[in-house]
Each structure stands twice: as structure tokens, then as C-alpha cells.
Image (spheres, coloured by chain):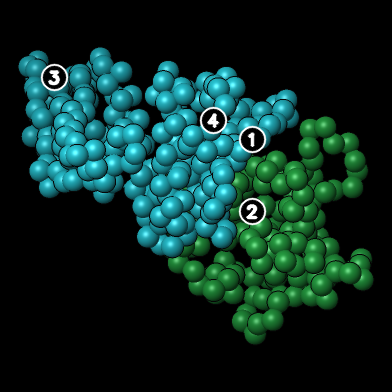
Amino acid sequence: MTVSDLIVPENTSIREHIEFEADRRVSIEIGCRLAFRSMGKPWETELTDTSLNSWYEIAPGGKSMYESISTEHWFARARSLCVHIPSKGQTTSASSSGSVTHWLVHARAVGLHQYLTKIARAGLISQETREQAIKVLNRLSEILSGSLSIPDACPGPNGHLLYTWDKNAHHLEVEFVPERRATLFYMNRSSGNVFELEIDEFDIPRSVLSTLRFFSER
Amino acid sequence: VILPQDDASLGGTVPDGEDLMRLTVPSKDGKVSPGAFELSSSDKAQNPPRLSVFAASRTTPDQAWQIMGKKPTYSIVARLTAEQIRSIRLVSQKAEEPELDVRWDRIETSLPGADGHAGLLGLHTDKRRIYRLKLADLANEREVTLLGKPL
């Protein structure tokens, strides 16, 4: 599913309303605002679904976790909206690439959380490994001021979990092994340069910043 | 050549032209992850340590799935040839002898297709992260076969 499968937006944004309860749980209400032009007229609508609103446990430090929220659900809602858009005279300009990028980053983040939840429920990783992986990713993202791209993820044998990022010749992994610190591994496929170091959510050297920049969304 | 210290189940080398299959869990983005080539604790306990693969000329993907215990999470098949595996070199490595090899590996089962089981050797060294990345890159150049419903 790509953005081009949706209606052609002039402006697309995700609205999030977040409430904290005693630093323990968080309520997330998510809406999607769509603005588009059809038959020479601007259209604007907001999709919300109260069934998505619920309380979620939050990790220490106030990080919210977008669990159980189906991106397919939002795409389906947007598609159903398309039925009501006259095709004749419809313009096809997208003037808000920043917002669309935000949509995709958001969708990938939701997809990662859903995937981690699925493989934990399937017994391929433990809940502890899932939580460790979320915390470490949040910390890595903080180091890069929130611009770190969302990694691919896959379970390995014996409860291992592997995050991977690939951009041109650059490859980055963070591997989680139960009851051990995570290992960060970088390889440049062209030069063959490699390095690896152990990390955890509390101890990530600032020296990895230059490596993380290869995988920035900006 | 079967070395004396090797497990008795280990046989000769798999021919270069053989297409090899590795059953694995799809990544979040539907790719073959480097983690698909990580040795499990039982793989490491073998002598020498080795990863289970199957020769496509002797085993079908479904037979391989049955032999591997019908795990529903093993829903994709990564493919690469024995020659590709033996051709993997580190950038700085100039040795002619391949560091990765594939040998026939007999397993105790009467299930059909078992004669296609082989072991991928050389993944237990400190260079394993580099090797498994190169293996995954090669596998992702090929079409990934779906065995069942992806995770």
C-alpha cells in the first residue's frame, strides 16, 4: 500500500491527542485530516475512529507505544472516502510532501510495533526483548533528534531479534539476545568497513551519531 | 573429505550448481533478514557448527517445511546456490579457500526429501555478521517463495 493508492491529497496530516494518566498509562486518539481538490473545489475531512481510542501502558520516560492500531484500517477508511469523490475533473497535485512523509513514517512506526507484538505473541521473542527493543530504538531516535528511520525487524533463533537499516552501501543492525546487552553492528558494503559495540538504552555512545546520520529521514 | 572429528552425519560437498533453500521467518518488510542465517544453540552444538539448508533438486519447499517441524512461522523460502555461498569473501580476504561451505548432512527421519538436507558451514566465526549479511543480500536478489500466510 502506498500513498499513491489513496486519494490525491493536497494536505494530509495525522492529528494525535495524547493524555497521560499518573505517568503510567497513555490514551491516544488519532485522527487523519485529509484535504484534497476535486471538481475545482477544495474538500476537507477528518477521519477518526473512537474504537482506536484506548489506554496503553507507557514505558519509563513517557514514551507512547502505538499498539493494536491498524494502518490498514486508515487506508481502508481513506479508500471508502474515495467512492464519494467525482473522478471527472479531479486534479492530481500533491502539495504537502512533508505531511505525506509524516504519514509514511507514522505508518512504518505503527507497523513495527504491530510486528513486534505479533512475533512476541507467537513466542518468537519474549516480552522483555520486545520492550528492550522499543526502548533502545527510542533512545537511538533521540540521539538523532527523532529523525532516525524506522528499521526492518526480524526474529532470529532462540528469541533473538534483529533490527536492520539499509541505505545505499550503508548497513546497520542492532541485535537483541535474551538477557544480554544489545549489539550494534555497522558495515559499509562498498569499503568493507565494519564496527560493532554493545549498547543498552542507558549507554549509547555519542560516537554512533555519525553512523546514525546515514539513516536519517531528513 | 570427511574429517575424523566431524559428526558422522556429515557427507561430501554439495555441487556448486545446487540451488539451496533456507526456510525462515519473513522480516517486517517481507525480506530475508541476515538473522535467517544466524546459528541456533543446537546448530552451534554440532561439530562443526552448521545451518540447515535443503537442496532444491532433492527436496521440495513443502517437504523441507515438514522436516523442519511444520512451524507456521517459517513462511518464506530463501534461495541461493552453493557456488554463491562459496564465492562469498570479505573485502580484505584474498584466500582462495572459501570460508563458507555446504556439505550433505544426513538427518534421522523417514520423511520424504530428507536426502536433500545439507549443512552450511563457517557461520560460527567472529565474522559471522558479515557473512550473514552477504548471504541475506544474495537471497534478496532472488524471488522469495511464500510457503504459507506471511507472519
Label disc, if present, on residue A204 of the rendered structure: 4
Respond whether the residues carrying marks 3 and 4 are from the same subunit.
yes
Task: Give the distance between the C-alpha atoms of the residues marked 3 and 4, in whole angstroms.
Answer: 47 Å
Q: Which residue is mark 1?
A: A197
B87 is higher (above) or lower (below) than A141: below
Instruction: Kindly check if marks 3 and 4 are in contact, taking CB atoms under 8 A apart as contact.
Output: no
Respond whether the residues carrying marks 3 and 2 are from the same subunit.
no
- The mark nearer the N terminus, 3 or 4, is 3
Chain under callout 2: B
- The mark nearer the N terminus, 1 or 3, is 3
Type of residue at label 1? Leu
Of residues A82 and A210, which is closer to you in this image?
A: A210
Can you tell which quarter of the image residue A16 is in? top left
Q: Which residue is mark 2?
A: B38
Chain under callout 1: A
Can you tell which quarter of the image residue B113 is in? bottom right
A71 is higher (above) or lower (below) than B51: above
- From the rendered image, report the letter of the chain displayed in cyan: A
Instruction: Kindly check if marks 3 and 2 are in contact, taking CB atoms under 8 A apart as contact.
Output: no
Type of residue at label 4? Ile
The residue located at (92%, 71%) in the rendering is B4
- In this rendering, would B13 be left or right of B151? right
Type of residue at label 2? Glu
Type of residue at label 3? Arg
> Residue A122, how many percent across, how many down?
41, 62
Chain under callout 4: A
- From the rendered image, report the letter of the chain displayed in green: B
